[in-house]
Each structure stands twice: as C-alpha cells, then as structure tokens.
Image (spheres, rainbow, N blue to C red):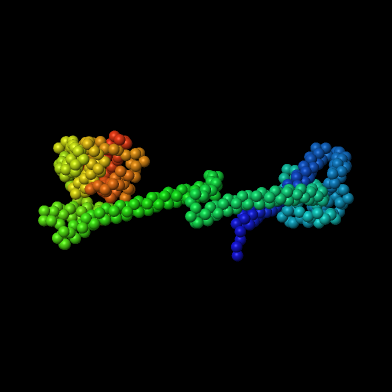
C-alpha cells in the first residue's frame, strides 16, 4: 500500500502537535488545580493562625474576637469552629460534634502541632466537597485544641473550569494554526522532492543539463547540491567519453592511413620482384624501401604495445645510476641525422658528474620521444639537451626553437591518440600521437614529474624532474 510522503509529513507533524498539546494541557490543568487548592489552603491557614494569635493575646475579649472573625469569614463563605484537646467541636453551631474523617495518624500529627490541610473531597459537616485546614494550638509542648476552618470548593472548581475552558480554546486555535502550517511545510518539502525526482528522471533519460535549486538550509538543499555536482561530473564524463571516442576514431583513421601506405608499398615492391618487373639496379632500392616501411609498421605496433603495458603496470623497472651526460650524448648521436634533415642542430649541455637513478632503456625511450617531438616541430633551429641537479632532483631539459604550442594544447598533448594539427601530415616519426603519452607514464613510474612551457612561435621546453636515489627509496617505503 502506497502512503504518500506528503501525508507522512502531515500526519507526523499533526500527531506530534496533538500529543504535545494534550500533555501540556494536562500538566497545566493539574498545576492550576493544585495551585488553586494550595492558595485556598494557605488562605485558611493564615486566618487560623491569626485567630489563634489574637485569642492568645487578648483572652478577655475572646467572645468579641470570635464574633468579628465569624462575621469576616462568613462573608468570604468560610466557616470556622474550635475544638478541644479531645477533638470535640464547639462554637459556630458545631457544639457536641466530634472531629470526624481524620485518621489516627493525622490526629497524632495535629496533637504534635502540625497543621493539616486537606485538598480532596471530605464529606464532613453535612457538606460535600470542602477544603479545610486544622490549625492546632500548642503552648509549651502541651496540646490544647485548635481551630478548624472550612471553605466549599465550588468556587475553586468554577475557576478551574473557566481556566480549562480558555485552555481548550487556546488548544483549538493553536491546533488550527499548526494544521495550516504543517500542511504548507509538508507541501513545500514534497514539491522540493518532486523537483529532484523529475530532474533525476531527466538525467536517466540522458539530459545532463538539468539543474535544481540548491541551498545549505537543510538536508534536501544539500541533496540538491550533491545532485547538481553529480550532473556536472556526468557532463564532464560524457565530454571526456566523447573526446576519447573522437580521438579513437581519428586514431583509427590515422593508423589505417599510415598502415595502408607502407603495406601498399611493400605489396607493390614484392609484386614487382615476383613478376620480374623491377630491374636489377632497382632491386636493392626496392628492398631497402620494403625494409623501411616494415620498420614503420613495427614501430606503430610497438608504440601501442608499450602504452598498454605501461598503463596496466606490466613493465619491470631496472633502475641504476647512469651518467646523464653520456645518455644525452647518445640521444644526440642517434637523432643527429634526423635533425640534420630539417637543418636543426642538437646541443648537449650537462656536467659530467651528474648521475641519474633510472631504468636505462626507459630513460632513453623518454628522451628519444621528446627529442623527436622537438625535431618534428622545428626547422632551421636548435634543440638543447640540458642536465642539472638540486638537493632533491636531477633535472633534464629539452628545449627547441620550434613553432611552439597554444596554451589550450599544452594539457592535451599527454592524451593518448592526440596530435597537434600540424603533425597530422605524414612524417617518419612521432606520427601516431602515442609518444608523449608513453613519456608521461614512464616519468610517473620513476616517481618523477614532467612540465611543459611553450609559447606560440617561440619554441617549447620540456622539464623532467627525477628524484634522487634517497628520495626514490623514501617514496617506495
């Protein structure tokens, strides 16, 4: 059975208010009733004490004092009687009657000088429902009797009923106001939850641009904040997925293009050799061409395999202390021919006493990829390979005087499949957009950092920081 949230909120509010009102009214009624009876008893006790004091001070005028008190108290509908030490009443038409309705314990307390106040309905003196007090008279430890004052409780009951009547009106008014307030508040909460539910339905339908009004006023507002944050993250994830999918499609197109060219070349040369369509003097050149194109295909496959191995942490790092100057000179020798083809010059600048703790093969792979990237985007310029160190890091800089990068391209170059627009033309190295992705992963595997600084038209500088051996050991621990 479905029980709507609106009714849950509404009935919970109303039930709490009803219980609270009932408890408060019962406590208040009990307190007022007790207060009325207590005030009446205090009034009677004060009259009794005053009467006994006056009688004790002026015993010669006792009859006159009794008469005065009788007149005053009768006007207030209070009657009083005196009793002796045996409990026999006298005066005020009570002669001959014995004090009734008291237990032996109560009578013993009276004889010891304790004042007795009765708030309940005692059926005595031919009256139903009276409040009476017994004020004993004790002098020097001897009990002589006392005075009994009675007052009907009808007036007190009337006042209590009047108070309860006004209390009932107050409860009804408060209940009505609370009823309306609970309805309004419940409807507001339900509307806020309904907006969240509708927004969730839109998100499930694929609309990630929906927003809900949020606040920090209560938990529903915080939930709305979390919902908006979730939608923002979903938007970012969707954009990233779309970007990755676009790069994947572009990559597949690039790979297809790159593979089609060498495969076509290899197929053509082999077909020519098979059918003796290539002359003897051109056979050597044809075989060399097949070898070059096959190496291009191998490089494409190796780059993809390397990236997947690095990304899934399947490579083993064999770190050792390597002289940095020697490694930079090896890079200079290996890529010097490629640099000369574009009229570039590779310059090495590093002290011979700097050693770097790294995997030799992976370090060479990092530097070759970055240096090839610099050669690719530089014409008639310089490429510097520098080495230096500080207290914590060995730092390698690869700087060129090439075309540089736009600011929005600097972060994108680490993405897999990403290639700057100018690099989309066919070239013999770095054409697949995987080199710098591999570089980034290899540097991270060395617990190092890599940064890029570039300005359009003024060149690019890669700064790689490898931690020294002590720093690397602490990181591993």
Q: Nearer the viewer, residue 8 or 404?
A: 404
Query: Left or right: where does residue 200 sit relative to residue 252?
Result: right
Q: Is residue 83 visible?
A: no
Residue 291, given in percent of the width and then of the height, sits at 17, 54
Query: Left or right: where does residue 410 sit relative to residue 227?
Result: left
Residue placed furthest toward the top:
458
The residue sitting at 37% across, 53% down in the picture is 245
Q: Nearer the viewer, residue 83 or 128?
A: 128
Residue placed furthest toward the bottom:
1
Residue 54, given in percent of the width and then of the height, sits at 81, 39
The residue sitting at 82% across, 55% down in the picture is 128
Q: Nearer the viewer, residue 47 or 151?
A: 151
The residue sitting at 23% across, 57% down in the picture is 263
Q: Nearer the viewer, residue 218 or 330?
A: 330
The residue sitting at 71% across, 50% down in the picture is 176
Residue 205, given in percent of the width and then of the height, sits at 50, 56
Query: Left or right: where does residue 207 sit relative to residue 290?
Result: right
Within the image, what quadrant is residue 46 found in?
Answer: top right
Quarter of the image that includes the N terminus = bottom right
């Amino acid at each position: 059975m479905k029980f709507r949230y609106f009714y849950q909120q509404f009935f919970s509010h109303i039930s709490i208010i009803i219980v609270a009102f009932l408890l408060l009214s019962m406590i208040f009624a009990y307190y007022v009733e007790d207060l009325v009876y207590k005030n009446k008893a205090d009034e009677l006790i004060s009259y009794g004490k005053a009467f006994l004091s006056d009688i004790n001070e002026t015993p010669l005028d006792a009859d006159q004092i009794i008469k005065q008190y009788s007149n005053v108290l009768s006007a207030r509908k209070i009657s009083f009687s005196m009793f002796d030490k045996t409990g026999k009443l006298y005066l005020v038409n009570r002669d001959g009657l014995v004090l009734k309705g008291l237990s032996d314990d109560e009578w013993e307390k009276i004889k010891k000088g304790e004042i007795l106040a009765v708030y309940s309905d005692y059926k005595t003196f031919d009256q139903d429902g009276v409040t009476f007090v017994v004020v004993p008279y004790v002098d020097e430890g001897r009990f002589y009797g006392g005075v009994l004052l009675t007052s009907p409780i009808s007036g007190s009951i009337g006042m209590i009923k009047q108070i309860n009547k006004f209390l009932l009106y107050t409860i009804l008014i408060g209940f009505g106001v609370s009823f309306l307030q609970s309805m309004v508040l419940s409807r507001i909460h339900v509307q806020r939850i309904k907006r969240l539910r509708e927004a969730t339905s839109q998100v499930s339908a694929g609309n990630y641009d929906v927003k809900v009004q949020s606040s920090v006023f209560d938990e529903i507002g915080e939930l709305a904040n979390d919902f908006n944050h979730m939608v923002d993250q979903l938007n970012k994830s969707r954009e990233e997925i779309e970007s990755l999918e676009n790069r994947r499609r572009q990559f597949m197109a690039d790979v297809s293009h790159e593979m089609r060219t060498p495969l076509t070349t290899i197929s053509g040369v082999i077909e020519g050799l098979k059918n003796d369509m290539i002359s003897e003097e051109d056979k050597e050149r044809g075989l060399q061409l097949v070898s070059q194109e096959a190496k291009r295909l191998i490089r494409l496959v190796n780059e993809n395999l390397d990236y997947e191995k690095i990304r899934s942490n399947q490579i083993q790092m064999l770190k050792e202390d390597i002289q940095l100057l020697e490694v930079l000179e090896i890079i200079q020798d290996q890529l010097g021919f490629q640099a000369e083809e574009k009229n570039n010059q590779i310059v090495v600048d590093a002290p011979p006493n700097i050693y770097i703790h790294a995997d030799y093969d992976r370090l060479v792979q990092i530097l070759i990829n970055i240096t090839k990237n610099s050669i690719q985007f530089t014409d008639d310029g310089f490429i510097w390979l520098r080495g230096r160190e500080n207290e914590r890091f060995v730092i390698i800089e690869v700087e060129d005087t090439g075309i540089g990068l736009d600011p929005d391209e600097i972060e994108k170059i680490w993405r897999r499949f990403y290639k700057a627009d100018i690099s989309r033309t066919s070239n013999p190295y770095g054409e697949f957009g995987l080199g710098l992705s591999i570089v980034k992963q290899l540097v991270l595997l060395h617990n190092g950092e890599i940064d890029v600084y570039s300005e359009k038209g003024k060149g690019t500088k890669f700064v790689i920081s490898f931690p020294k051996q002590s720093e690397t050991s602490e990181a591993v621990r």
